[in-house]
Image (cartoon, rainbow, N blue to C red):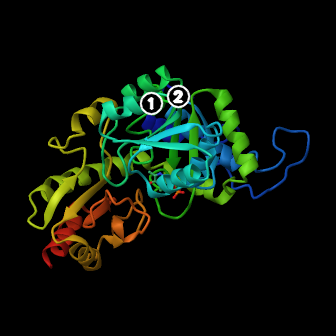
Amino acid sequence: MTSEWAPDSRVVSLGRPPRTPDAPLNTPIVPASSFHAEGPLEYSREGSPTVAALEELLGDLEGGTAVAFSSGMAAVNAALDAVPAGGVVLAPSHSYTGTARRLRELDSVGRITLRTFAADSAESLANGCVGASLVWIETPTNPMMEVTDIRRAVAAAHASGAFVLVDNTFSTPMRQRPLTLGADIALHSVTKFIGGHSDLLMGGLVARDPDLAEFLRTRRVLLGAAPGALEAYLAVRGARTLALRLDRSEETARTIAARLVQHPAVERTLYPGLPSDPGYALMARQATGFGSVLSIVVRGGAEAADRVCLKVRLWTYATSLGGVESLIERRRRWPAESKDVPEGLLRLSVGIENPEDLWRDLDQALRSQ
Ligand SMILES: *Cc1c(COP(=O)(O)O)cnc(C)c1O
């Protein structure tokens, strides 16, 4: 079952057992570290039936071969193993904190050479590509919501002999498919939208080239970063409703973003789905939607922003994103967050609750300063 069906059908249909009499509709949770010898399965760091169901689903949606990992960060590290010793990694000047921290660490011990570019500048990216081994893209960036031109990045990177990885966590393959735009690897924190219920940690890499996918699978074996069967089961179960959840949360995010632009307590609203946003036209060209994460800069800095987090009642003050429940947090409360991120920035992950309830709750929290 492949491209005959639309993505919102495939996300429901793939990763299931063959349709034979009495077979279960869902891939069972197979809690085994080891399997009887002489078959394709031997040991579950290399692969297991429940994990394979998620890989089939994710690979199909992104248009490549997927390898699942125990977390998004495990996937980040596995992908970085493809960089030769001392090789240049070109990455955004600010991005997901875990990735940015790991890149700085690897640079400081001489494992890689880190070079950065401004995520919203095609020139900055093209200049940085020269001599690079890997071009790392996150679009939109977490949490500044800048949009990078994937096609242009791929052209510049491939001309320099570099491979391109796109962290596609914010958009999901329902909205953006980096491999079809020429990227070599798409990365997911499956923890976020694909899992969708804030109840698991998992990651995934999808490679266009099967040999590269095999290399990444070997990284999982040697780094010991295999996901558990229960997590894989929950991720597949969560993914079944990805299309529906995203349609709903994205629509609400757009409504809320448009209102936040007018809000007296808000200095800036960062959401590429606003026609006034600098990333709007580009994202409209390379994605089919803008997702449901947005950031706002609250007037009054860190203290005012912290008070908003303590005043919300329907929204939840917690980190992470992409779940059914709406989350809000001040990113700079994390010491590792980039100093480029304003102190008063709140990242909002819009969930699937009633849109007007979400608005009323956010509005009262912003006003009770
Ligand atoms: C959360 C996140 C990661 C890391 O994933 P974990 O599952 O938390 O290890 C990587 N990239 C982005 C964009 C993220 O939001």
| Residue on which the image places disc 2 | 162
In the drawing, what numbered circle is on residue 129? 1
Q: In this view, does 163 lie to the left or right of 305?
A: right
Amino acid identity at mark 2? Ala
- Find the residue positioned furthest to the right: 37
- Residue plotted at (30% across, 43% down): 290
Asked whether residue 48 is in view, the answer is no
Asked whether residue 161 is in view, the answer is yes
Mark 2 to mark 1: distance in Å?
7 Å
Q: Is residue 353 left or right of residue 174?
A: left
Q: Is residue 114 above or below residue 214?
A: below
Report the front residue among 44 and 161.
161
Q: Report whether the residue tagged 2 is closer than 8 Å to ligand 1.
A: no
Q: Where is residue 34 in the image (x, y as percent from the top left)?
A: 84, 53
- Residue plotted at (41% across, 67% down): 319
Q: Is residue 139 left or right of residue 40?
A: left
Q: Where is residue 73 in the image (x, y as percent from the top left)?
A: 56, 54
Disc 2 + disc 1, Cβ < 8 Å? yes
Task: Give the crowd class for mark 1: few <14, some 14-19, many >=20 residues within 10 Å.
Answer: many
Amino acid identity at mark 1? Cys
Q: Is residue 27 left or right of residue 59?
A: right
